[in-house]
Amino acid sequence: MNYFSSSFKLGILGGGQLGKMLLTETRKYDIYTCVLDASNDAPCKIGSNEFHLGDLLDFDTVYQFGKKVDVLTIEIENVNVDALEKLEKEGITVYPSAKTLRTIQNKAKQKLFYIDNNLPTAPFSRFAYLSEIEDAVNNGGLHFPFVWKAAQFGYDGNGVKIVRTLEDLNGLPKGECITEELIPFKNELAVIVSRNAKGEVKTFPVVEMEFHPEANQVEYVICPARIDPEIAKKAEEVALKTSQAFKHVGLLAVEMFQTKDDKILINEVAPRPHNSGHQTIEANYTSQFEQHIRAILNLPLGSTANKGGGIMVNLVGAEGYTGNVVYKNIEEIMSMDGVTPHIYGKKETRPFRKMGHVTIVNEDINEARKIAEKVKNTIKVISKNQ
Amino acid sequence: MNYFSSSFKLGILGGGQLGKMLLTETRKYDIYTCVLDASNDAPCKIGSNEFHLGDLLDFDTVYQFGKKVDVLTIEIENVNVDALEKLEKEGITVYPSAKTLRTIQNKAKQKLFYIDNNLPTAPFSRFAYLSEIEDAVNNGGLHFPFVWKAAQFGYDGNGVKIVRTLEDLNGLPKGECITEELIPFKNELAVIVSRNAKGEVKTFPVVEMEFHPEANQVEYVICPARIDPEIAKKAEEVALKTSQAFKHVGLLAVEMFQTKDDKILINEVAPRPHNSGHQTIEANYTSQFEQHIRAILNLPLGSTANKGGGIMVNLVGAEGYTGNVVYKNIEEIMSMDGVTPHIYGKKETRPFRKMGHVTIVNEDINEARKIAEKVKNTIKVISKNQ
């Protein structure tokens, strides 16, 4: 198929910041795009050829939208999968596949998938209701501390909690959930695997994620990870095996733990461009967004090598500020060499809301890490008149 | 002024491929943009917040458009300068300034500016009409060979011709023109100077341009130029001096000749992002497009250093093909490491029409040059059914 012609249409479910960064690539290749999103303020309203307003979880809306395009992809997992299944049956190319999305949307199914495919992951239990956890604790089947995860619709640290006492369960959603053994780990790592339909596979270099101690949000993504090459190789292998198990086409971001005894355990996966790959825009020969487009259109994959060390700092709303956003000291960070802010364009900030990210590129990853800390300590996402 | 808020509006005159690449940066920073262009098919119709249809040479159209924005810039020189002058007087920030544009729009004025400011350039003569050239030749005031240039509205090798006999003048536009001594040169070089209103100045590394022998279009832009560091320094100094003479804010691309005896002579300048800087998107810490936005908004300038060797290959329509464009073998070049095509989205190709460009990034500039030649020999911009 000739993608570089106006008769081809690419559909994207979701019009958020990931979609916006995908659109940079579709503009570069002049690929015609249609975006579906429920918000009239979605970033992808600008940059897409057609913007459609509608509910991503509504069967008819997704189905009708999908019928208009040749290839359909997502920038958010929470979409109506029944519609995708029907579209696949009717010949629309859908990446990630409905089957993969169905597995990934539900964390219990996702964990079972790892077990079924002999992929390393932390031991877990599955519960239909939160109340069953208390029973399991009381009858000795579950021991503190453990990690509680909502089975559905969690993201960015929402839907995840470390539970040390029964009181910690208060206020959690009542529905389906899993508990995982709390694994002491040295590092959180991630590998983004790209694969096209003809089976070409390329992995981006392993990244290391430093988390904010309270908000459970990634604070720094560091690429390449400052780890033993043997560990990096192991992480890459696990990520590749995971992508193969899903027979995945597109990007699969595989988040992993490096345990105290240097085992690699899969934490979770995302079948799309991912926060752990934003630094690829500036730091790698091919960005994750370009690679996703290449993969789902069955084009040759680009080189995933680094041009230099890359670090991504999430720009999140500062605590104590809610309202019209102001990026305090943004000019100071722009005066630092190799520093590039990305502003997502959300009008209102609130504590820990993701408002953008900043990339730091430097030949020397340790130097980049120092600059990243300076960036983090300089820019503040606050609100007006506070 | 807070650019990162929706109350600020940036206006861009012209909605072509340069504008499209500027919009990638305004999207990254979430800067609100209004674009004016005469064509409803302009690439900037997508990616701008507001797209206005109108004639860039019409006083009222440009004036009314300019009144809507806070800062006004251009992506093409051929705009109504009287309107810009009035807008400046009324407090709109206009970069490049009306005065600079007026000088640059007319090649005779541009040449006089160099002379007045003691900037090195090839000797020239000015003619109100083409017919005066014949008189000058006949009375011995002008000798073959020389270069004819239309005073106005030439670009990409249009409006430039080497004249060796009187017959070569046939068919040229009758209007105002200049003739220049044909200087034997070793290299054509270019330096893009960036400067913001507070006077911060940064130059991009010197590039070397290899021209197509027939079409007089740039075939390869090579950065950094493979020249003696002394020559590079001299070229940078001339470019800086030129930018200072214009008191320029924004980007100024200065095209120069390195003569056989290693003098640097200014060929011409462009007060905007330029074809000789496209490779900065992938090869430099800051792209020329981001730098232009930083400069005109008086933000700190970014590092202009190379991340690696960068080469730009223009994608022009192949001879013998006119009609609906096909990018033959684009997949083959996409499978080469460090190769990124940019497709401008013009529906119809014709011989030598600029349809896109390809960037090649490699640590080793000589290796990049080899890949660039392979790219050039592989991809063909042709038309359907021919």
Image: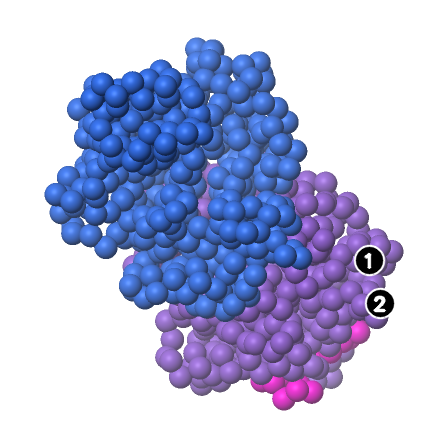
Chain colours: A purple, B blue
Say which label, 2 or 1, has the lower sequence index: 1
Amino acid type indicated by mark 1: Lys
| Chain ID of residue with mark 2 | A
Above or below — where is A329 with respect to A195?
above
Question: Would residue B295 be seen by someone viewing this image from the given angle?
Answer: no
Dot 1 falls on which chain?
A: A
Are the residues tagged 2 and 1 within 8 Å (C-beta)? yes
At 60% from the left edge and 37% from the top edge, which residue is drawn?
Answer: B42
Q: Position of residue A165 (x, y in %)?
A: 63, 70
Disc 2 secondary structure class: loop
Residue B329 at x, y = what percent? 54, 64
Query: Which residue extends farthest right?
Result: A60
Q: Name the residue: 43% across, 78% down.
A: A232
**Disc 2 from disc 1: Cα separation:** 9 Å
| Rendered image quadrant of residue A207 | bottom left
Instruction: Please check the rendered image and state whether residue B156 is part of the magenta-colored stretch, yes or no.
Output: no
Magenta residue span = A115-133
User: Picture coordinates of residue B117 (x, y %)?
Assistant: 20, 22
Q: Name the side, left or right, on which B88 lies relative to A243.
A: left
Across and down, in percent, residue B31 comes to: 53, 36
User: SS of the residue at dot 1?
Assistant: helix
**Crowd tier of the residue under label 2, counting other residues whose Cα lies within 10 Å: few below 14, some 14–19, many 20 or above:** few
Please tell me which residue is depicted at 61% across the width and 72% down the height of the picture.
A196
Point out which mark residue A67 bears.
Answer: 1
Residue position marked by numbered label 2 in the rendering: A90
Locate the N terminus of chain A by quadrant.
Answer: bottom right
Q: How many marks?
A: 2
Answer left or right for A301 relative to B50.
left
Residue type for callout 2: Glu
Is residue A120 visible from the viewing direction of this image? yes
